[in-house]
Amino acid sequence: MTMLIKRNANGGVPTVFDELHDMMNNAFNDGAFGPEFTKNFFGIDFNKQSYPKTDLIDDGDCVLFEVEIHGLTKDDVSVDLEPSDNRNESYLVISGGKKETDKNDKRNYIRKEIKRSAWRRSWVLYEDQYDVSKIKADVKDGMLVVSVAKVKDQKKKSTKIL
């Protein structure tokens, strides 16, 4: 089975605060109160997160990262492979975002909902599971698709120890 470790929006290992955020998100959006109660009473929409939603798909020979980037172009996103302190792993880092509106923008906004902040997500790629030299990325129709090749199954042979 392929194993990925989810990283939080800042690229770190999820903390107790990330877990609390997930619990609050579940309680107010999917739980007894529901999303309308949360938006109407608190004015909060827990579904508006600072990073795009991503699907991870096991495609046999590779793992596909499908990232929803509607409204962004190829120039607005970056896909990088960063080294880890552990020499047996690397980080696949996907980041991007729209530029902030011009500080001299004098338009009179009645409501401003378009998110223009930067985001960054990362996943650990273990070198015994993924061939990091074979990573491909493409942007099409509002989706960023990153393909990471799996290491071909190597037949494990038994070794006599004693």
Image (cartoon, rainbow, N blue to C red):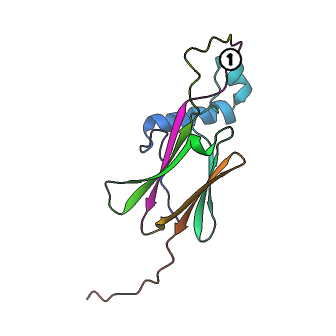
Q: Position of residue 74 (x, y in %)?
A: 61, 46
Question: For this rendering, which residue is in front, 43 or 48?
Answer: 48
Instruction: Answer yes or no: is residue 1 visible.
Output: no
Q: Amino acid at mark 1?
A: Phe
Confirm whether the magenta stretch covers residue 120. yes
Q: What residue is at 68 percent from the left and 17 percent from the top? A: 41
Please state the extent of the stretch shown in magenta in the rendering.
109-127
Q: Residue at x 59, y 71 (%)?
A: 61
Circle 1 — which element?
A: helix
User: Can see residue 23?
Assistant: yes
Query: Which residue has dot 1 on it?
Result: 41
The image quadrant that residue 27 belongs to is top right
Count of number-bearing discs = 1
Left or right of 156 on screen, residue 135: right
What residue is at 56 percent from the left and 25 percent from the top? 100
Image position, residue 95 (x, y; %): 52, 43
User: Depth check: 125 or 35 in front?
Assistant: 125
Residue 11 at what x, y percent from top left?
Answer: 44, 43
Give the residue drawn at x 53%, y 34%.
Answer: 118
Say above or below: 146 vs 43: below
